[in-house]
Amino acid sequence: MEHVKTLLIKGAATLILLYLVLGLGLGMAFENVLLISLVLGVVSYIAGDLVILPKTNNKVATASDGMLAFVVIWLMGMAVGFSGGAMVITALVAAAVMGVFEFYFHAYIANKEVGMNRSGSPKWQTDN
C-alpha cells in the first residue's frame, strides 16, 4: 500500500509540473502531457526511487532522475510531433523542474522508508 500512495503523489506532481511546462509553456495537448507523465512517473519510480536511491544517496538519485526525465521528455515530445530543437530546451526546463521535485520526494521516501532497506545504509546484492 505504501507504493500506491507514493506512486499517486509522484504521478500527480509529475502531471502538474509537466502540464505547466509542456502544456502551458509549449502548447502540448493534455493527452500527450498525460502520456509522458505516466511513462516518466513509472520509469523514474522504478529506476530512481526503488533501485538507485536505496543504493546511493539523494544527490545521485536526483541527478539520475533529472537525466532520465530529460531523455524521456525529449524523445516522447519528438514522438508526438514537436521538433527536436524546441523539445531540447523545453525538456531541459522540465527536467530541472522535475529535479527540484525529485529532491524533496526522495527525502519523503527515505523518511517513510518506502522501498528502502531498514538499516538506512546502502546495500548491494553482493553484500551479505
Image (tube, grey):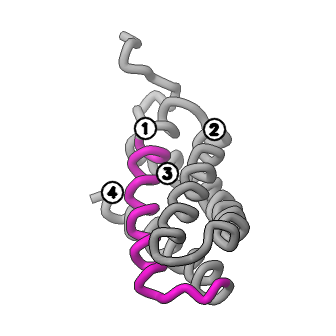
**Label placed on residue 51:** 1
How far apart in space, not on screen, are marks 4 and 3 (Cα)?
Answer: 10 Å
What's the CA distance linking mark 1 and mark 3? 12 Å
Name which residue lies at 53% across and 71% down: 77
Bounds of the magenta segment: 26-50
Amino acid, disc 3: Ile
Specify the label residue 79 is tagged with: none
Displayed quadrant of residue 23: bottom right
> What residue is pinned by disc 4?
2
SS class, disc 2: helix
Residue nearer the viewer, 111 or 48: 48
Question: Do callouts 4 and 1 mark residues in contact (Cβ within 8 Å)?
Answer: no
Quarter of the image containing the C terminus?
top left
Q: Earlier in the sequence, mark 3 or mark 2?
A: 2
CA gap between label 2 and label 1 equals 12 Å
Q: Nearer the viewer, residue 120 or 24?
A: 24
Q: Is residue 126 left or right of residue 105?
A: left
Q: Position of residue 89 (x, y in %)?
A: 72, 67
Residue type pointed to by label 1: Val
Instruction: Give the residue at mark 2.
Output: 60
Q: Earlier in the sequence, mark 1 or mark 3?
A: 1
Inspect the magenta stretch and tell me whether residue 36 lies in it: yes
Mark 4, Cα crowd under 10 Å, few <14 / some 14-19 / many 20+, is: few
Q: Given the image, on which type of amino acid does mark 2 rest? A: Val
Quarter occupied by residue 73: bottom right
Q: Is residue 111 magenta?
A: no
